[in-house]
Image (spheres, rainbow, N blue to C red):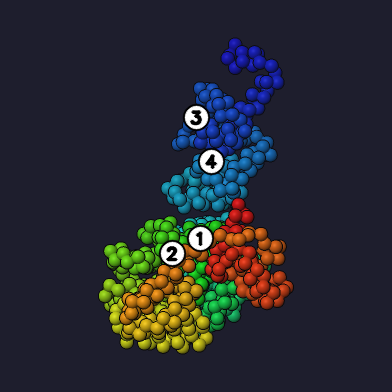
Amino acid sequence: MSGSRLLRNSQPAGHWEDRELERHFLLMHIAATCPADARELSRRLARPVKSVQEDLKELMQQGVVHVHEGALRTSAAQRLLAGVEREELHAIHDQILSELESGQSPKAATLIALADSGCTRSSLLTALIKEAIKNPGNTGALGALTLVARARGISEIELDLLKAQECALQGESDDALALTDPLLTESDSGVAVTAAKLAAGIHVRENRLARASALYRHIGKEHIGHESAWAVLAALGQGKLDEARKWSATLPNENLTNQDAGLVDFARGISQSVENQGSEALDLLARSIASLAPLGSDVFLPESPAAIAALVAIHSGEPATAEVLLKRALETDLSGETGRNRHLLFLGWAQMTQGRLKQAETTLAKVSAPDDLNERDQLLHGSLRAGIARRQSDFATMREAWREIRSKTFGISLTLYDLLPVGELLVIAARLRDTDRTSMLLEQSTTLLAGLGNPPIWATPLHWHAIQAAFQAEKPDALLPHATALVQAGKQNKYAAILAQAGNTWLAVLRRDVDFDSVKASVEALADNGHVWDAARLAGQAALQHPEREGALAMMQLAREVSKDQAALTASTPKSSTLTRRETEVARLVLDGQGYRMIGEQLFISPKTVEHHVARIKNRLGAASRADLLEKLHDLFMRTAN
């Protein structure tokens, strides 16, 4: 009598039936999913690990189960799958696919087994595409991908397009373009247009705006749809205002999805930043982030709306607002890994501008290695590193960063969105007496701005940095055109007016004409507009230039107070975290970056009432400024969410 029969005869019938059922389920999971080990099976079968291990040991001894390439397999797979009930097999598929959709990453063997067992779900197709991109030499995964694609009626051309879209999501731009290029001339116009939109978006992300614009023109206004938002971005980035206006006019009026609405707000926001004042531009860009943030990393965005919003905020003297918008983007994983690096770089920049250099260093350390960044973000990374070093008087690091980034500026096609790092490089090059390269960058930048009519929001920081560079180089004549430009911009832009006055005060200080009231006014205005480090430096230089000891001490005290105020704002705690229902509604919209008018329109109250609500919220939270309010609201809602 066999051992199995002796075991069957020695056990109650019900127990034996249960054991047979357990064995059946175990073998079905191995046949349909090729799990890695007993622990994986234990989790899926809801059985103790030891019990599963015992069954596996016996089945291996019988030659029914074996291990191959790190996965459990059964020689009875074909027979089991042929005889299983469809509902039972679908239940196993559902279990594995739910793991996929929750973010778990089954091994390639499991994905292949799912395909071989007849699963054709879209989530499996996506997982196999990711596996094929990650491991192009895995022929088993490629075969499984082809099998699932054919079962779903997807042609080889359409599959290449899906692969390209996944490459774009993963930040593999070269691989994505290698797949889209042959599709641009496809006879299937739908495939060709989709491929062209994707390729153009990739060129936007890589800062190749001229190539992106050429593709958008090739697509044409009749096919571009909401992608015209990126065409607007590309045109403005090159200083082509008329072209941007034409693309803006093609934006669809109907926005059926959050993504559509977010893209329209994004295009209008970036256009407003060039053609009008910053407050409305920032409102629209913040609204775009609110619409697109829930999409996280699941949708390919050529540029992060949060990055552009942060640029506009920093260019408008509101680095604290930039911080709030960037932190929200990081929390939602907006634009995936590429977006994460860009958000961290601008977050570090906002912190550096406000004089929080240690925080800026910590943030910069979280960014991927420079060699893993594209050229656009390498420029930003190097400029941020050098800028932090300059403010810390770390000349060795500043020189090293400058040498690294200097070589990367050759052949670069500057865009509107690179002016912030270019401005910092102007000051660093002047400090190191190496201005040959930056004089060309400054010329390119001023030409680009002139093409857009010298918009104050985008031109103001560049002129401010150019003035600082002239101070560093001890060339007062070099600052005159930039000082004049700031004064002109100041007629319609408050931030430009503040910087123009500060520049005038600084020049007077360097000429030893130190007036305490003028210096104090400029120092406080700079600090209130996010330039805490510059404010402290102005006060410090005034102390050095003051002819009398008493006046010099007063200036030194002013410098200390500015730095101390920033530290106090960072460390202060709210008086009370309790807000009324209406105050909470207002607070959330303030945190979204929206202005009083737009908040009032959404809540059906007047802008003046919104202003009163904000005043009460500031009082409840003990916020000393708008920047402090935004930081405290962010912390408050994060604690509530947790």
Circle on res. 66: 3
Q: Residues within 10 Å of mark 2 (few under 14, many from 20)?
A: many
Distance from the alpha carbon under mark 3 to that under mark 1:
60 Å
Q: Residues within 10 Å of mark 1 (few under 14, many from 20)?
A: few
Say which amino acid is labelled 4.
Answer: Thr
Say which amino acid is labelled 2.
Answer: Arg
Residue at 51% x, 33% y: name it. 37
Circle 4: element type: helix
Q: Nearer the viewer, mark 1 or mark 4?
A: 1
Name the residue tied to disc 4.
110
Mark 3 vs 1, N-terminal side: 3
Name the residue tied to disc 1.
571
* Residue 597 seen in the current view: yes
Distance from the alpha carbon under mark 2 to that under mark 1:
12 Å
Left or right of residue 24: residue 426: left
Distance from the alpha carbon under mark 3 to that under mark 2:
59 Å
Name the residue tied to disc 2.
356
Distance from the alpha carbon under mark 1 to that under mark 4:
50 Å
Residue at 36% x, 68% y: name it. 391
Mark 4 vs 3, N-terminal side: 3
Circle 1: element type: helix
Q: Residues within 10 Å of mark 3 (few under 14, many from 20)?
A: some
